[in-house]
């Protein structure tokens, strides 16, 4: 059993900052790409940022220059530092690990989501 547990969401004023964390637990051998997605009310889930095990990053155009993704491979943890937040960043943020390698194979895992609300 592998779980992703997110933390760090909450309510913040526009222009403020939040830091999300996501820790994977279980009998994990390695994790490939980890990322953050978000889903606003009435909208589809979208990729916010991702990072490979080697540290290569990818960002949505809407967050470039404001958000920074990082990870600690030894702790199977990924972070999302969000600065200069805007009301349009309001959404449920989901952590994703696209390939979690176990000794018996691999699987994709999603976190339960954490709500980020940015007030104007």
Image (cartoon, rainbow, N blue to C red):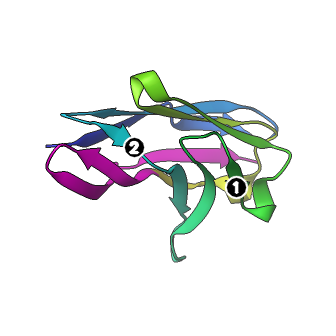
Question: Mark 1 highlights which residue?
Answer: 58
In this rendering, position of residue 72 left or right of residue 114? right
Secondary structure category for the residue under label 2: strand
Q: Position of residue 29 (x, y in %)?
A: 28, 36
Q: Alpha-carbon neighbours of circle 2 within 10 Å: few (<14), some, or many (≥20)?
A: many
Q: Which of the pair 111/2 is nearer the observer? A: 2
Question: Mark 2 highlights which residue?
Answer: 31
Is label 2 in contact with label 1 (beta carbons under 8 Å)? no
Residue at (29, 47) in percent of width and height: 101
In this rendering, position of residue 72 left or right of residue 106? right
Vertical relation: 54 (above or below) 18: below
Q: Which range is magenta? A: 95-120
Q: How many marks?
A: 2
Name of the residue lying farthest toward the right: 65
Q: Position of residue 72 (x, y in %)?
A: 52, 26
Is residue 98 shown in magenta? yes
Q: Position of residue 56 (x, y in %)?
A: 68, 46
Residue 108 appears in the picture as rendered? yes
Q: Which of the pair 105/19 is nearer the observer? A: 105
Residue 21 appears in the picture as rendered? no
Vertical relation: 60 (above or below) 3: below
Residue 13, image quadrant: top right
Secondary structure category for the residue under label 1: strand
């Amino acid at each position: 059993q592998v779980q992703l547990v997110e933390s760090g969401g909450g309510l913040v004023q526009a222009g403020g900052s939040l830091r999300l964390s996501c820790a994977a637990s279980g009998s994990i051998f390695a994790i490939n790409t980890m990322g953050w997605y978000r889903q606003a009310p009435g909208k589809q889930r979208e990729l916010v940022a991702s990072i490979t095990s080697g540290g290569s990053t990818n960002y949505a155009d809407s967050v470039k220059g404001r958000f920074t993704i990082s990870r600690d491979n030894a702790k199977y943890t990924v972070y999302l530092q969000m600065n200069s937040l805007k009301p349009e960043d309001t959404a449920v943020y989901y952590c994703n690990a696209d390939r979690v390698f176990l000794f018996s194979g691999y699987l994709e895992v999603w976190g339960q989501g954490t709500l980020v609300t940015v007030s104007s």
